Amino acid sequence: MKSSLICLFCIALILVACSGQATPTLYVPAEQVNLPVANTPTTITTEEVDSALDSRIPTASPDCTSNLLFLQDITIPDGTRVQPEERLDKRWLVENNGTCNWDRRYSLRLIAGLDMGAGPDLALFPARSGSQVEIQIQFVAPQDIGRHRSAWQAADPGGNLFGDTIFIEIEVSNP
């Protein structure tokens, strides 16, 4: 009985589908569309830019360990002689050897010495766990003659310091 009902239902469907009557297409009038005029400035908010960047920047997972391993000085070896108020481009090669991905919430903090014009808190370059990155800070040598050292350490989003200390050590001499 059940199979006969199914057969009848299928035959009815086929007959209705093959009846030759087309389903009428309803006319839908076009709506007026306002297209942007060329050279019209588009305003993008800071929040929209941050949101777009956040989707591409690695983020820290909640149960991870932050760490930074110093690998080498790229520029300005320790003890380099410089002139008073000379601009210095210091770079270090480091590795994110923790399990956290550094995002824009991570920073570098001055922990000892002069900031030499860099400021006490700087953004840490975003980096995935296990990757090597170059950290760069622009300094200005002090006016005072003698040896100067500026030491920096990474900080996580909670403000906790972690990893190796990186530093610049220079000898300011008479011109």
Image (cartoon, rainbow, N blue to C red):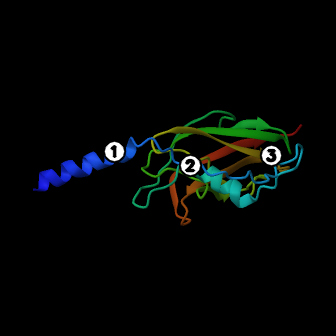
- Label 2 or label 3, whichever lies nearer to me, is 2
Q: Label 2 neighbourhood size at 10 Å, few (<14), some (14-19), many (20+)? A: few
Instruction: Name which residue lies at 75% across and 57% down.
Output: 119
State the residue position of label 1: 15
Labels 3, 1: front one: 1
Q: Position of residue 50 (x, y in %)?
A: 67, 56
Along the line of sight, the residue nearer the viewer: 119 or 133: 133
Residue located at (42% from left, 55% from top): 65
Decide which of tag 3 and tag 1 comes sooner along the chain. Answer: 1
Give the secondary structure at mark 2: loop
The crowd level at tag 1 (other Cα within 10 Å; few <14, some 14-19, many 20+) is few
Q: Is residue 32 visible?
A: yes
Residue 2: assigned label: none
Residue 7 in the figure: left or right of residue 1: right
Label 1 secondary element: helix
The residue beneath circle 3 is 141
Q: Nearer the viewer, residue 70 or 150?
A: 70
The answer to whether residue 122 shows anywhere in this view is no
Q: Label 3: how many residues lie within 10 Å, few (<14), some (14-19) or many (20+)?
A: many
Q: Amino acid at mark 2?
A: Pro
Measure how far apart labels 3 and 1 are at the Cα level: 91 Å
Q: Closer to the N terminus: mark 2 or mark 3?
A: 2
